[in-house]
Image (cartoon, helix red, strand yellow):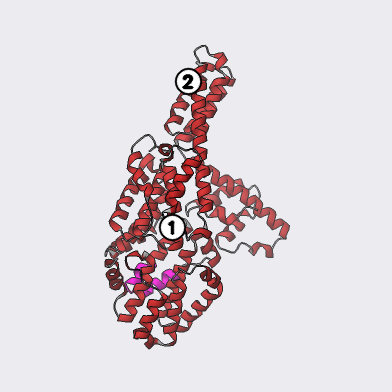
Amino acid sequence: MISLNDLIALQNEKEKPAFIQFLEKRNKRHDTRNITLYKDFLNGNEKRLLNEISVNSYNALKKRLCDQLIDFLASTILSKELSSENKVIKLIAISRKLLALGHVHTGLLLLKRAETSALAIEHHSLLNEIYHSMIEYSHKSATTDLESLFKKLEKNNEQFIAQERLSVLYASMQRQFNTTNFNMLPSSLHEMYNEGLKTFGINPERAANFRSLNQLCILTDLYASQTKNYKELDLFFEEFIPQIQGGSKDNEQSLGYHIELLYGLANIYFRRNSLTKSLGYLEQMHIQMKRVNGKYFERWIASYTNLLALNYNFSAAWEKALKLIEEGLLSKNLSETERSLLKLNLSMIHFQQGNLSEVKVLVNSFKRTDAWYLKEMGNEWLFNFKAMEVLLHFDLGNDELAESLILSFKRKYGVHFKKDQDNPIWPFLLLIKAILHDPELIQSQKFEQKVESSIPWKGENEDFFNLCIYAWLKAKMKGEPIYETTMSLLQKT
């Protein structure tokens, strides 16, 4: 059965009451419980109705709600999607209706207009539909040049096949570049890409578009996020961006990939502590977000805000970062995942400034289960949250609770850390546990040696977030403020 929670995750806060109104208008009977079930899902109490109705009735109600939510989401997405692609589809639909009714001249004129728009966005499947329609009705128009149409169709099919080969190339790279192969050198991605172009007979010039560059960036970031080795990444695809920006490939159809690519590079440079380059890509990203009447603005504003705030925070402008995230959280259009992302980093900024009461409020505001956060936010987010929770109670003097959280973390995720030896979170929590048992240990030479052996400092190759963990320990060992220690370590990388 389709997951209702997955569908609900697509809604922002403004759309949830709108869906309830949608259901109210559709309900013909007053005893329909679809709204009740929907609210139960929103409150994380989806099984509550099973105490009142049978399992069969519950499953039937759940299926109907799922279908209604799909209808609502589809209409909402289509109403927002005023893209060139939809305009072409509408032109094709109208022209085919005209052609079927015998209005050939007007129908073909609309098809030519659709062709011009489809060429502008390089939409080969729609172009195929247009050319097939033109050929189908060519016998009713004396002015139609069949030979020219066949050549256009043939050329478009070649381009379509080349595009599909690119998709196959990236799918095969993704399969090779999975979690079992993260011992590969970062440079092997470049080699794999070049070999793939030769194997599939793909013109390198055709491969240089925002969609393919974004896929390369995703693969590169995937390697780095798993190995925490952002410094050694070979960003060979970066040099193609200036070549295609502002050109024919920089169109509305590619805009989503363009924005995601710029965000990906901004994130990679942030994790490298190259904040000037990160801010440069964020500036470019913001410009692209405003294109086409801000078509993708709402989709990307939370991610943009979050990364910009992190750049400010680690550029010694934490007040600016704090204000930026707090203003971002006022938006009613944020999804639960976007809100969680912003709140966790807001917690980190407050924590670095010693604002423990604010951190406590924020930490207590996370109401979802660990399973939900693991699925929706990923393990890095969840583990950072768990570490933040432990540190909060450590600094508040809640030693028993802090130790209980560490033991709970070990029970749930111990298997994960046996497989992921490079992740510093578990050895970090073990160090916290050690000083909970013996508070005087933290300022001893023995503890300093234990820190160095448990969490080896990579210097300039250190990952940004690992550095924050290391900085907390250093600050505690030296009795210095956390933020100042963090900034001092950043200057050495």
Quarter of the image with the C terminus is bottom left
Q: What element carries label 1?
A: loop
| Residue position marked by numbered label 1 in the rendering | 185
| Residue position marked by numbered label 2 in the rendering | 109
**What residue lies at 36% left-to-right and 81% top-to-bottom?**
448
Q: Is mark 2 on a helix, strand or loop?
A: helix
Q: Which amino acid does label 2 sit on?
A: Leu
Q: Is residue 214 left or right of residue 56?
A: left
Out of 451 and 13, give the one closest to the viewer.
Answer: 451
Q: Position of residue 94 (x, y in %)?
A: 53, 26
Q: Where is 289 relative to 127, above or below? A: below
Which numbered mark, 1 or 2, is in the foreground of this view?
Answer: 1
Question: Magenta-highlighted stretch: main secondary structure?
Answer: helix
**What residue lies at 43% left-to-right and 61% top-to-bottom?**
341
Q: Where is residue 103 in the image (x, y as percent from the top left)?
A: 54, 17
- Magenta region: 347-364
